[in-house]
């Protein structure tokens, strides 16, 4: 079983701002923090957009006298509805990114899981070896007993039967 | 327009005094600009009288219209438009008049106020329009919500399955592939990079990277081209095998997560994917093993003779009589697996020589055992091949001492490689089966002999023991006699054994037997019991075993005779008693493995000083000569009683 080590992305859960020191670990931590900040901003932006646009839609429900303004507002409503859907789609993509990051992060958990599985399989292999050894011993004992019965029986000794006649 | 229009203008631009102060200062109104003056004059124009007049006329007209029978619904609008037209005409005339005298500009115009019903109708139209707009938006939101929900569900299924797969497999993502193919670019890497590979033997197989796709339902899917991966197959090319070359490792698989089966749940889909990946993993292992087999076969290791090579197929000779093949067979998905390559090669295979020559197989008797093949089970050989390669090559990086023990752990022979060890194990297995058949034939021919197998748990060593057990009746008699005589310390042996050990193709026989030479010189050969240990070949095995057993029986009779107090001589297969007058009475064993009635027969030979001259001229085949008599195939009880009779004869002659 292979340990978790492939793929891109660092641990998003590594937290931010640990950045003292050099090397891939601190660079990865900085990148993760930056990515986390970007995601949070994206979330805030999207949700603010959705709230703003929805508020506008609610506010614009009042009917105005000049029909020209109503047409203008209709166009604005369509535009804002599209923007709302776009923001929702952006949030969905953010969720996909988070899941992908979760796939390629959390190596500690993966490694622990791999270690557990290896220990479990090693135990199973030992158990199987012991079982095989036990089966072998039982087979040897059974073989010995069967051979003793077979050769002490009258079946192979047709020569004796012939003499007794 | 009716009526006179009077316009009053101030013709004399006299400055009028506005204020006189006490001090006599006169203040005049500020100078008004020319523009302002004109505007103020225009504003002084009063059209009220004209408007009132028009209103009066309109009311009269309305009254007249109301009294009329038919009323036009747009009449009010027409009236309003006419009034508006009149007002506009007045204004236009004024403007023309003013412009004719001086240039002026219209400052503003106010829209006529609509009636309430018109305002309400406009409002209703606007409200309906807005409502329609909101409904349209509602539909749009619903469609978008459905699409987003579906996408979310698809992604939840996909990533959930992928995370579960990641528990056991290495998941990678290639962004370049993602951009090119349009999907996320996930792959599963099946290559085991923890293998110990100092020589770079293991190259990543094309199957090592498996692409992860989406099916129509959005679930994770792994699609492999048909017959893209292979499984290892091992078989014997011999006419005497009972097992036909069958594929033991092929399994019918389907591409994981068939979207047409709606009843397949996500769990089952993930399990199927696991199974498919495991099969591919096994296929990679099979390919690596086949690659290693080819390398070792080409290196001309001991015990390995290559007799045929094709693509994904190699044929080896095991010894001189048996051929085996190792091939990679494509594993198709969901189809019948036909081993076409091996069946074709079977037709062109080199058939081995007769492997059963020289064996004593009684064919006429109904109770004879079935003729069994000496070729081992090919499935067990295949498993053994995979196991030794897995243990000694693929697990080299891990702890060897802990995994080297156990039932099947044994190091390969130096210099021959694993394939050589495997071939020599096969050769040993075939040879040991032949040895076992020989031993069984011998045991079948000697009623008082038994065979016991000793599993050695070593692939190139086999061991058996042949027992000759003294019957209990004789043992009781011996013990009774021993207690009566002075040989109280004598312990009668209850059984004799001969051990046969086969290592590779060498047979080693070990057992109690003839006295050694040193003992003979000392004159106490009967007290020295030597262990014979010697090697022999398969052709002579039966004779040697029978001679060994016969010598053990003779030795036992000799001991019994000595215990009784009779002086007897033991010479390999002959037990001699001295009678008076120099005569010698001998009990001689004769061994013949091909004798169907019994492999050990007994003769009684009388010898004196004169008989030896006639012995050469006698017909040996005549059992009824005066100096020798054929006793037949005697059991141990009969032998013992015969020996006691001879002892009695010796005693009687002495008395």
Image (cartoon, coloured by chain):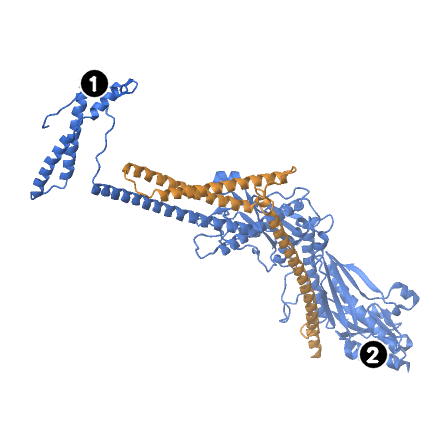
Chain colours: A orange, B blue
Taking B59 as reference, is B639 above or below it? below
Q: Secondary structure at mark 2?
A: helix
Taking B89 as reference, is B254 above or below it? below
Q: Nearer the viewer, residue B26 or B502?
A: B26
Whether residue B330 appears in this view of the structure is no
Q: Which mark is residue A26?
A: none
Taking B181 as reference, is B444 above or below it? below
Residue B85 placement, left or right of B136: left
Question: Where's the C terminus of chain A, which quadrant?
Answer: bottom right
Q: Which mark is residue B478?
A: 2
Residue B171 placement, left or right of B447: left
Q: Is tag 2's residue or tag 1's residue first in the polypeptide sequence? A: 1
- Horizontal and vertical percent position of residue B443: 72, 69
Local packing at callout 1 (Cα closer than 10 Å; few below 14, some 14-19, many 20+) is: few
Chain letter of mark 1 equals B
Residue B341 placement, left or right of B261: right
Q: Tell me which corner region of the image, top left, top right, bottom left or bottom right, holds residue A164.
A: bottom right
- Horizontal and vertical percent position of residue A93: 47, 43
C-alpha span from label 2 to label 1: 169 Å
Residue for badge 1: B102
Residue located 64% across and 71% down the image: B367
């Amino acid at each position: 079983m292979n340990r978790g080590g492939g793929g891109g992305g660092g641990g998003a859960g590594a937290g931010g701002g640990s950045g003292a020191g050099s090397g891939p670990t601190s660079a990865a931590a900085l990148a993760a923090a930056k990515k986390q900040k970007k995601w949070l901003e994206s979330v805030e932006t999207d949700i603010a957009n959705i709230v703003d646009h929805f508020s506008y839609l609610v506010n614009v429900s009042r009917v105005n006298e000049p029909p020209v303004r109503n047409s203008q507002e209709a166009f604005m409503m369509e535009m804002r509805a599209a923007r709302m859907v776009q923001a929702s789609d952006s949030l969905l993509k953010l969720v996909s990114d988070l899941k992908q990051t979760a796939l390629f992060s959390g190596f500690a958990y993966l490694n622990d899981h791999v270690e557990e599985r290896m220990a479990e399989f090693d135990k199973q292999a030992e158990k199987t070896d012991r079982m095989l050894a036990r089966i072998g011993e039982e087979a040897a004992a059974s073989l010995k007993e069967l051979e003793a019965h077979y050769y002490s029986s009258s079946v192979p000794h047709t020569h004796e039967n012939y003499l007794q006649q | 327009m009716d009526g006179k229009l009077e316009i009053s203008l101030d013709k004399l631009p006299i400055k009028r005094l506005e204020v006189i102060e006490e001090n006599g200062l006169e203040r005049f109104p500020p100078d008004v600009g020319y523009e302002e003056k004109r505007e103020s004059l225009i504003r002084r124009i009063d059209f009220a009288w004209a408007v009132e007049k028009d209103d009066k006329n309109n009311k009269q007209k309305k009254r007249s219209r109301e009294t009329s029978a038919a009323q036009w619904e747009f009449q009010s609008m027409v009236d309003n438009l006419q009034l508006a037209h009149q007002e506009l005409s007045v204004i236009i005339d004024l403007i023309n008049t003013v412009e004719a005298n001086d240039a002026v500009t219209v400052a503003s115009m106010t829209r006529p106020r609509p009636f309430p019903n018109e305002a309400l109708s406009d409002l209703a139209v606007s409200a309906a329009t807005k409502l329609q707009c909101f409904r349209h938006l509602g539909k749009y939101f619903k469609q978008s919500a459905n699409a987003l929900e579906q996408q979310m569900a698809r992604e939840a299924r996909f990533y959930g399955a992928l995370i579960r797969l990641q528990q056991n497999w290495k998941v990678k993502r290639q962004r370049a592939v993602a951009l090119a193919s349009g999907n996320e670019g996930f792959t599963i890497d099946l290559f085991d990079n923890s293998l110990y590979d100092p020589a770079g033997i293991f190259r990543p197989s094309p199957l090592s990277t498996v692409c992860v796709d989406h099916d129509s339902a959005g679930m994770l899917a792994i699609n492999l081209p048909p017959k893209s991966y292979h499984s290892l197959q091992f078989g014997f090319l011999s006419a005497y095998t009972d097992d036909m070359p069958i594929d033991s490792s092929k399994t019918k698989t389907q591409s994981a997560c068939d979207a047409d089966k709606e009843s397949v749940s996500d769990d089952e889909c993930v399990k199927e994917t696991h199974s498919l990946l495991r099969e591919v993993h096994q296929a990679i292992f099979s390919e690596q093993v086949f690659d290693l087999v080819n390398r070792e076969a080409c290196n001309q290791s001991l015990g390995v003779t290559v007799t045929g090579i094709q693509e994904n197929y190699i044929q080896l000779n095991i010894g001189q009589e048996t051929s085996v093949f190792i091939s990679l067979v494509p594993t198709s998905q969901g189809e019948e697996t036909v081993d076409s390559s091996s069946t074709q090669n079977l037709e062109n295979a080199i058939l081995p020589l007769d492997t059963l020559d020289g064996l004593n197989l009684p064919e006429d008797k109904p109770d004879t055992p079935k003729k069994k093949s000496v070729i081992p089970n090919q499935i067990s050989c295949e498993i053994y091949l995979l196991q030794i390669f897995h243990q000694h090559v693929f697990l080299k990086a891990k702890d060897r001492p802990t995994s080297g023990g156990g039932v099947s752990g044994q190091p390969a022979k130096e210099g021959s490689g694993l394939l050589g060890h495997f071939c020599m194990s096969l050769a040993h297995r075939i040879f040991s089966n032949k040895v076992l058949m020989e031993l069984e034939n011998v045991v079948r021919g000697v009623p008082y002999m038994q065979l016991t197998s000793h599993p050695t748990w070593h692939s190139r060593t086999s061991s058996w023991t042949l027992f000759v057990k003294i019957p209990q009746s004789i043992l009781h008699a011996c013990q009774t006699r021993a207690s009566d005589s002075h040989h109280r310390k004598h312990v009668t042996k209850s059984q004799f054994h001969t051990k046969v050990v086969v290592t590779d193709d060498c047979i080693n026989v070990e057992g109690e037997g003839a006295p050694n030479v040193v003992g003979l010189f000392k004159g106490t050969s009967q007290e020295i019991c030597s262990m014979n240990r010697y090697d022999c070949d398969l052709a002579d095995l039966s004779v040697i075993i029978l001679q060994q057993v016969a010598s053990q029986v003779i030795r036992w009779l000799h001991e019994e005779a000595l215990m009784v107090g009779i002086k007897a001589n033991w010479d390999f297969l002959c037990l001699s008693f001295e009678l008076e007058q120099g005569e010698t009475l001998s009990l001689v064993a004769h061994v013949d493995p091909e004798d169907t009635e019994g492999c050990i027969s007994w003769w009684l030979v009388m010898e004196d000083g004169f008989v030896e001259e006639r012995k050469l001229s006698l017909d040996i085949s005549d059992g009824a000569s005066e100096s020798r008599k054929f006793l037949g195939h005697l059991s141990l009880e009969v032998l013992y009683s015969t020996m006691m009779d001879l002892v009695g004869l010796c005693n009687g002659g002495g008395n």
